Image (cartoon, helix red, strand yellow):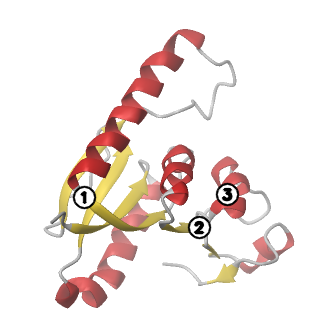
Amino acid sequence: MKPKVILLIYGSGGHKAQMEKLLIKINKEYEEGGVSFIGITESEASILHPDIIETFEQPPFRNKYFSFINLFSIPRKYYNFISCFSKINKKYKVLSVISTGPGLAIPFSLLFKIKKTKIVFIETWSRFETQSYAGKVMYKIADKFYIQNRSLFKFYPKAIYSGLL
């Protein structure tokens, strides 16, 4: 029988900090249920936490500061993504996916959504007047979409306001 896990997808910097805060809050609810966590993150952004039993590092899907797409990197990123998804799928029963961003969340969420896994997305706390790229897409995919600033209701009218993590 595969271990039951919640998949955490986060990036570096603020995405990681938000996931660490969220993990502290939700950890208490899942301790008795035999559920552990696994992570997918950008390279070198792993969270060291006793309930995260495994972390898969992935290269970022895009450079947010540079709009040019490197066509030579697409096959490698696609291979890394499919390989990571296959390993997770074979080894674990993913109960839900929770992400604080970045765009890395999009392809994994799409595949797990096909498998009828619940998707939760938390728009970053640094957004007040604009949407993130991941937020624009994940708003359409996620079963629950949370915002941390009320000003974002103008972009995400059906979102759930959670306040800051």
- Percent coordinates x, y for residue 23 in the rendering: 33, 74
Image mark for residue 135: 3
Circles 3 and 2: CB distance less than 8 Å?
A: no
**Residue lying at 48% horizontally and 17% vertically, measured from the top left:** 75
Pick whichever, 121 or 150, lies toward us. 121
Pick whichever, 142 or 51, lies toward us. 142
Up-down relation of residue 95 to residue 66 (above or below)? below
Up-down relation of residue 4 to residue 39 (above or below)? below
Tell me the quarter of the picture where residue 97 sits: bottom left
Q: Amino acid at mark 2?
A: Trp
Relative side of 78 to 71, left or right: left
- Percent coordinates x, y for residue 165 in the rendering: 48, 78
Q: Secondary structure at mark 1?
A: loop
Q: Secondary structure at mark 3?
A: helix
Circles 2 and 1: CB distance less than 8 Å?
A: no
Give the residue at mark 1: 92
Give the residue at mark 2: 125
Q: CA distance from mark 3 to mark 2?
A: 12 Å
First along the sequence among labels 3 and 2: 2
Q: Amino acid at mark 1?
A: Tyr
Relative side of 4 to 43, left or right: left
Q: Residues within 10 Å of mark 1 (few under 14, many from 20)?
A: some
